[in-house]
Amino acid sequence: MPTAALRCEDLVKTFAGTTAVDGLNLTVPAGAIFGLLGPNGSGKTSTIRTGLGLYVPDGGHVELLGSRDPLAVRHRVGYLPEERGLYAKMKVAEQLTFLAAIRGLDQAEAARRAHAWLDRVGLADKAGSDTGDLSKGMQQKVQFAAAVIHEPDLIVLDEPFTGLDPINTRLLKDLILEQRERGATVVLSTHLMEQVEALCESICLIHRGRPVLDGVVAEIRAGYGRNTVAVEYEGDGAGPLTALPGVRRGEDTGQEARLELDAGTDPQAVIRAVVERVAIRSVRLEHPSLEDIYLERVGASPSPAAEDAS
Amino acid sequence: MNPSQIVKVARREYLTRVRSKAFIIMTVLIPLLMGGYIFVMPLLFTSSGTDELRIAVLDAGTGLAPALGGHLAAIERPRVEVAEQAAVPDDSEAVRRPYTDDILAGRLDGYLVLTPDPVIGARSRYYARETGNPVVLRDLERAIEATLLDRLVAGTGVDTERVRAWQRFDLDAVTVSDEGETEGGFEAAFFSTFALAMLLYMAVLINGQGMAMAIVEEKSSRLIEVILGAVTATEFMAGKILGVLGSGLTQLGIWVGALLVGLLYAAPMLALGPELADFDLGAVLSLELIVYFSIFFALGYFLYSVFFAAIAATCTSTEELGQTMFAAVLPMVVALMSTFYVIANPGTTATRVLSLLPPFTPLVMLARVNVLTPPFWEIWLGIVLLALGIVAAGWLAAKIFRYALLMHGKRPTLPELMSVIRAG
């Protein structure tokens, strides 16, 4: 097993004059869960498709599971695309069997695993139903099963949590961790920062086709120092706490506030100011959350790139 | 290209199609409709529906009414009863009024008005409540014709029956080839060729359309991203075409089977009359023709399926597909329309060139084989060129496929496609 499951060097991908990926360098370490983050239209999906060999790069190169030809190792990859689709008129079990079989499993083994996976995601009783009759969440679980059924070395999940209820979100998280236990590398592309924080060891944040931040999550956060004051409080102070001097930015819901401080501001001074204003239930001095870092790096302004260029 | 991957894609495509409701309905409905058409229409046209026709004959000065009465009496099924014969001054509305009233009151089924004509002796009009039955009109027409003929030959010593036989003169054409002589000329060749051409056209159109729709659906549901992560675009396209071909052949097999059963059992029971009994299927469809038809059917089907697949790959919605799809069948429509020319002129340079151009070969060469039997080497040159055409089109389509399948929202432009093709 090479040390990197996916390596992109100076990757460029353009579409009709629009540059979706702009000289991207990216290394996904093998055996970890890797978060690929970025706003809509930042080039995540283009990066994934090029990395998996679905697009031919316009510049630079890709090394997928140690191979310069991504298509040569395609059977060792599992991919859950962001926009979901299955054969609506096909029986669920047959569909999974087919998707397993075209990844190189023989028919009997494919069928056996299809039923095992349906059992695992709680859809055993739907094996004979038309896929189109399943709810969205159920179809999503089927698609996740389809992405991992051939036990790939690299699993790429583009927004896997969209539309799942809390129970299924938990189930999916467990299943993703299970895949890592098995030794697989997981690339997770999502906007849900809590999931990234809960699952990913390292991340790459892409903005306008270029990485603006990458590395191990804990190290990134530590690099920012403990510059965030998290407060839970009761009663209303005079105006939002984000207006306090020394607070660079933050949010205040009226019960909870996260205050990111200017460099050089003494956190103790800010905490004292908070105590004077409101009745505190708890107060902590924290590393910034990934969301804070994300917002800082990408900016709160929406990306000018169009949605479909992603 | 990995054959086992193609088989897996083809297998899925085949099973999904064969089990679909549309397939089952089409498979059952088409023979029923065709059977209905073949067996019921002749019955409708040979029986008039009524047993007896009460008519009046109004003679405005031709003097033919009594003689016509004799010929009308000879008509069977429906028997014609001449209820009244009247001499009238002219065929004006006022004169006809009482008879029209009789029709409206149900006392008459209709009436014939004879008016003089300087050249052929008489003109005639038939007034009736029902004038749509071709059998009745034909019988009345023949009776009047016979009456006029009688008067024409009267006193010349010419036998009316001989004139009628002469009227039915027909030129029999015999096709001479290396294999011997075959009865039947343009008509037989035209209809058998046209029937085979239509069969191929329908098969390509229905199945190609179905496949194109399926590709656009896979594309818009993004399932294509998962599948293309597992099989190559070429494998995917080849599997799709084979699967659709398989389901098409299954359907055709069921239809041919139903037709044979129908001919074996239904035809004698329905006693379809002398015209059909005389129809010699073997004379029109030789074994040679069937072999060549199978070859051209399979190859033509392949070529056009590739066209359909390539076009479907560039479409982002079924609406867009509907607007573009005609381009795939355009060459076949041209070939179909040129069938007239080809059958009439099977040996000209234009026809020979046309029959060697892959998109036209299936229909045009088949027509030539049917009419003339071109040199053996020419037929096989056509087949080889067609096969090469399929390989070339498949290679091109696979490139378009790979590039266009993952594009959503917008269609690739022609220059984009050209650069993809050149890129290798």
Image (cartoon, rainbow, N blue to C red):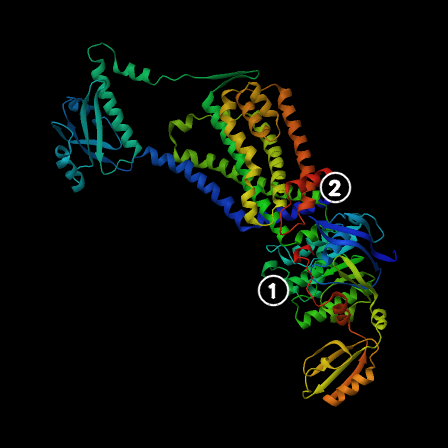
Q: Residue at left 27%, top 16%?
A: B161
Image quarter (top left, top right, bottom left or bottom right) of the N terminus of chain B: top right
Q: Mark 2 belongs to which amino acid? A: Met
Quick one: SS at disc 1? loop
Residue B287 appears in the rendering: no
- Local crowd size for mark 2, using a 10 Å CA cut-off: few (<14), some (14–19), many (≥20): few
Q: In the rendering, at what x and y percent does residue A228 appear?
A: 79, 78
Q: Residue at left 68%, top 72%?
A: A167
In the image, is A64 to the left or to the right of B301? Answer: right
Q: In the rendering, at what x and y percent does residue B69 appear?
A: 18, 25
Vertical order, A175 against B1 (above or below): below
Vertical order, A150 against B213 (above or below): below
Give the residue at the far top of this rendering: B157
- Local crowd size for mark 1, using a 10 Å CA cut-off: few (<14), some (14–19), many (≥20): few
The CA distance from mark 2 to mark 1 is 36 Å
Q: Residue at left 55%, top 18%?
A: B348
* Contact check, label 2 and label 1, Cβ < 8 Å: no
Give the residue at the far front of this rendering: A245
Q: What label sits on residue B1 in the rendered view?
A: 2
Q: Residue at left 66%, top 57%?
A: A306
Q: Which residue is mark 1?
A: A135
Quick one: SS at disc 2? loop
State which chain disc 2 sits on: B
Q: Mark 1 belongs to which amino acid? A: Ser
User: In which quadrant of the rendered view does residue B419 lie?
Assistant: top right
